[in-house]
Amino acid sequence: MKVVLLAGGVGGARFTRGLRDLGRAEDLGLDLTVVVNTGDDLWLDALRVCPDLDTVMYTLGGVIGEQGWGRADESSRVTAELHAYGLGWDWFTLGDLDLGTHLARTELLRSGLPLSAVTARLCERWRPGATLLPMSDDEVETWVEVEADGDVTTIHFEEWWVRHRAALPARRFVQRGVAGARPAPGVLEAVAEADLVLLPPSNPVVSIGTILGVPGIRDAVRGAAAPVVGVSPIIGGAPVRGMADACLTAIGVETAARTVAEHYGARSAGGMLDGWLVDDTDAADVHAIREAGIEARALPLLMSDQAATAAIARAALDLGRELAASRTRR
Ligand code: GDP
Ligand code: CA
């Protein structure tokens, strides 16, 4: 069964790991392709850093740091050296092992390889058990228009997220470079050939929203032959980790499982969702989501451990199969 996921960092990575492990444990024959957001990418100290690609690669490779990014068991001696020279960014720590990845990536990019080929090369080492595709080989960066002390300025998404903890109210997000960006090789093909398209519990605005903003990808998902099933990143009116509420507020969407589903929209009404999983806490919204044309189910959605994550992944597969079967019957 070919499954395509559109993923950001931590939420997307943990869900994908759970799905991969379930597929292995039960011999489900899953063939996974993860289309990863690259809008968070940035040039830092002359290195190309791809936060979401690395989080997915390290998580699936079993070497992710406990905090959900960077590598397990690494130090930050190189960053400390940079700081001693008055260089580097004091709000963004790059661990020493992680820096190895950024050096390798930058060297491969400089040799002329596109990001998709570089990612494939890095994944040869980590064997993620899934094909990782950047959403685009073209540089697309999310910048945030903020108002500080009465002035409007635009800062890189990572600066807003990490340095300001998304506390500076965002006026809007600007995806620099997106208009001319093309989907990376294999992205549209994977969506077209998929048996199931999944939106894991990733940030709907700056992770999945950014991927869908690459010309061609939204239409490919809307037109996919496969069912499209999403998992809510919002539980009980709040994000589980991080500050996705600040992103939703900026685009005028209330932070709730139902409103995020409506934001994606029902495929039957020109949107992209056929199915949506909400947490038990939000079970009262299931009816309204169905009324909006999206089949919904409520179950525990906290990815607290392997078993909990596997149960969510199973529910997403089951809903996808049901939707596919009901479509064939029609
Ligand atoms: P980022 O790029 O690291 O911010 O990661 P993603 O965009 O992939 O995912 C961020 C989203 O994952 C946030 O909105 C969180 O609410 C959501 N999330 C994180 N952990 C969980 C979880 O255990 N369950 C659910 N349902 N959502 C989660
Ligand atoms: Ca991210």
Image (cartoon, rainbow, N blue to C red):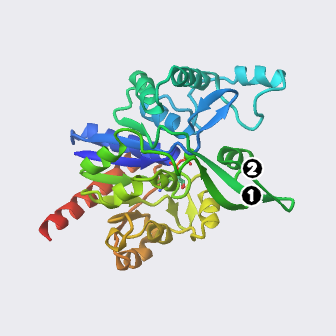
Disc assigned to residue 121? none
User: Is 123 left, or right, of 295 in this rendering?
Assistant: right
Q: Secondary structure at mark 1?
A: strand
| Residue 64, x across and y down, in percent | 52, 32
Q: Which residue is mark 2?
A: 164
Q: Is residue 265 above or below residue 59?
A: below
- Which residue is label 1 attached to? 146
Residue at left offset 51%, top offset 39%: 138
Q: Residue at x 48, y 31 (%)?
A: 58
Amino acid type at image mark 1: Val
**Horizontal and vertical percent position of residue 99:** 61, 24
Q: Please tell me in which quadrant of the rendered image residue 24 appears.
A: top left
Q: Secondary structure at mark 2?
A: loop
Give percent across and percent down for residue 277: 38, 63
Do callouts 2 and 1 mark residues in contact (Cβ within 8 Å)? yes
Callout 2 amino acid: His
